[in-house]
Structures are given as C-alpha cells and as structure tokens.
Image (cartoon, rainbow, N blue to C red):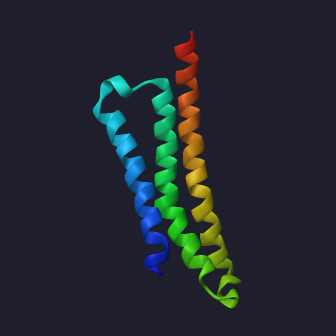
C-alpha cells in the first residue's frame, strides 16, 4: 500500500480521537453522558482509521481482475462492517446511561 496516500489521514484519525478517549479516561469530571457518546464515536473513528481505511485503499488500488476474487470482496466488506457494528454496540451501551441520567 502506498503510505503517501493514507498515512496522514490515518494518523490524524487515530491521534485526535485517541486524545479524546485519553482525556475522558484520565479525568473523572469529563465522564458525562455526552462525553460517553463522544468517546463511542471516537472509538468508532479510530477503528475506521485503523481497520477500514487501509483495507479499502489497498482493495481499490488493485486491478479489476484481482478485485473480482470472492475472498478479497469478503475481506473488503468485513473491513467496512466491523467498525459500524462496534459503534452500534457502544451506542447501545450509551442509551441506557442517557435514560438513567434523565430520570
């Protein structure tokens, strides 16, 4: 994979969101319902920058003949789906906290 095309975007995706997660983990005063939601989005962004973006860039830089392989199509699909499912799990954990906070 060509690092010139993806390196900066991946690093900024991991770095900025990693700082958000670290700040909320380090300071108890930042552990609010809103920040819990923001951390779930940050973790999802980190996964997309780490898992999805490199695979997608690699997959679409290949020739059309290689992309027609069913195994590569399966890998490309899973790399896109996994971060979405992780984000859904975090959101489902956040919703009860919001409901309890409103009561």
Nearer the observer, 35 or 97? 35
Q: Is residue 79 above or below residue 23?
A: below
Residue 53 screen position, x and y as percent: 53, 66
Which residue does the image show at 47% across and 31% down from the upper left? Answer: 36
How many marks can you see? 0
The quarter in which the C terminus is drawn is top right
Nearer the observer, 79 or 44? 44
Which residue does the image show at 49% across and 36% down from the upper left? Answer: 38
From the viewer's perspective, is 94 left or right of 21? right
Q: Is residue 94 above or below residue 20?
A: above
Which residue does the image show at 47% across and 45% down from the upper left? Answer: 42
Q: Is residue 4 above or below residue 63?
A: above
Q: Is residue 45 above or below residue 29?
A: below
From the viewer's perspective, is 64 left or right of 79? right
Residue 16 screen position, x and y as percent: 40, 50
Where on the picture, by quarter, is residue 13? bottom left
Specify the farthest residue to the top. Answer: 103
Residue 75 screen position, x and y as percent: 60, 71
């Amino acid at each position: 994979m060509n690092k010139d095309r993806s390196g900066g975007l991946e690093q900024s995706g991991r770095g900025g969101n990693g700082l958000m997660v670290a700040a909320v983990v380090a300071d108890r005063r930042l552990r609010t319902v809103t920040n819990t939601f923001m951390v779930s989005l940050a973790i999802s962004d980190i996964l997309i920058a780490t898992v999805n973006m490199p695979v997608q860039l690699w997959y679409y830089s290949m020739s059309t003949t290689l992309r027609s392989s069913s195994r590569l199509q399966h890998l490309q699909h899973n790399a896109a789906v996994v971060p979405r499912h992780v984000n859904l799990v975090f959101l489902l954990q956040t919703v009860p906290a919001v409901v309890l906070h409103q009561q």
